[in-house]
Image (tube, grey):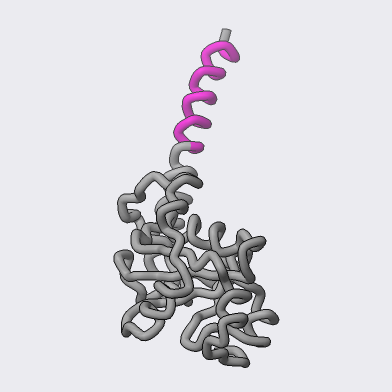
Amino acid sequence: MGAAVLLPVMLKRSLVECIGIFLFATSLAFLTNFFRSDGLPLIRPKLLPVSAEDNQGNNISLQTLKEKFKQPGVIIFDARSPEEFAEGHIPGAKNLPYYEFAEKASGVLKNIPFDQEIIVYCEGLECSNAEDLSFLLKENGYTQVKIFEGGWEEWRENGMPVKRGEG
């Protein structure tokens, strides 16, 4: 009879200990995040639903990019690899390969407001990296993202200015 009475008491004690460990670990995680320079925000900006159809109205032509290229405040992202970027890119563009988004986004996007006009490009019509990067940017709260569909190929073939090197 004594063992039958002790069992519920032991289960209750184990449950209380588990809850205590969970609360301690959660508190420690919040404190660590708070003091890290690259900590995650606790309140995320409201995200708009993004689908593949959303990009259809966001493609821009070479002519539009030529006009935007001259305007201050427009940010251009090259979604290609760092090696391709170094071989040649649109002057003023920043390299943010979509497949390195998780590692590089916090540094590259640090001071860019969510309503900033952003233009993304990659190699050309056959390249989906710009669409992928556009999706990731929108998913993270950026609302003014456009895609230069003709990409690097069209830019270069039309004799537009080219910059070589890393930036």
Percent position (x, y) of residue 78? 55, 75
Q: Which residue is drawn at 52% across and 31% down?
A: 14
Query: Going by the picture, which residue comes out furthest to the top?
Result: 1
Magenta stretch: give its range.
2-18
**143 or 18, which is in the foreground?**
143
For the C terminus, the image quarter is bottom right
Q: In this view, does 100 lie to the left or right of 26?
A: right
Q: In this view, does 126 lie to the left or right of 145?
A: right
**71 or 86, which is in the foreground?**
71
**114 or 64, which is in the foreground?**
64
Q: How would you classify the magenta stretch by its main secondary structure?
A: helix
Q: Is residue 88 left or right of residue 70?
A: right
Q: Is residue 110 left or right of residue 81?
A: left
Q: Is residue 56 above or below residue 164?
A: above
Instruction: Judge whether residue 32 can be spotted in this image.
Output: no
Query: In the rendered structure, does residue 100 fall within the stretch colored magenta?
Result: no
Query: In the rendered structure, does residue 16 fall within the stretch colored magenta?
Result: yes
**120 or 2, which is in the foreground?**
120
Percent position (x, y) of residue 43? 32, 54
For the N terminus, the image quarter is top right
Percent position (x, y) of residue 149? 53, 64
Q: Residue at x 63, y 71 (%)?
A: 123
**Quarter where residue 109 is shown:** bottom left
Count of number-bearing discs:
0
Q: Which residue is drawn at 36% across and 85% down?
A: 70
Percent position (x, y) of residue 31? 39, 61
Instruction: Judge whether residue 71 can be spotted in this image.
Output: yes
Q: Is residue 101 above or below residue 165?
A: above
Q: Residue at x 45, y 76 (%)?
A: 76
Q: Is residue 24 above or below residue 79?
A: above
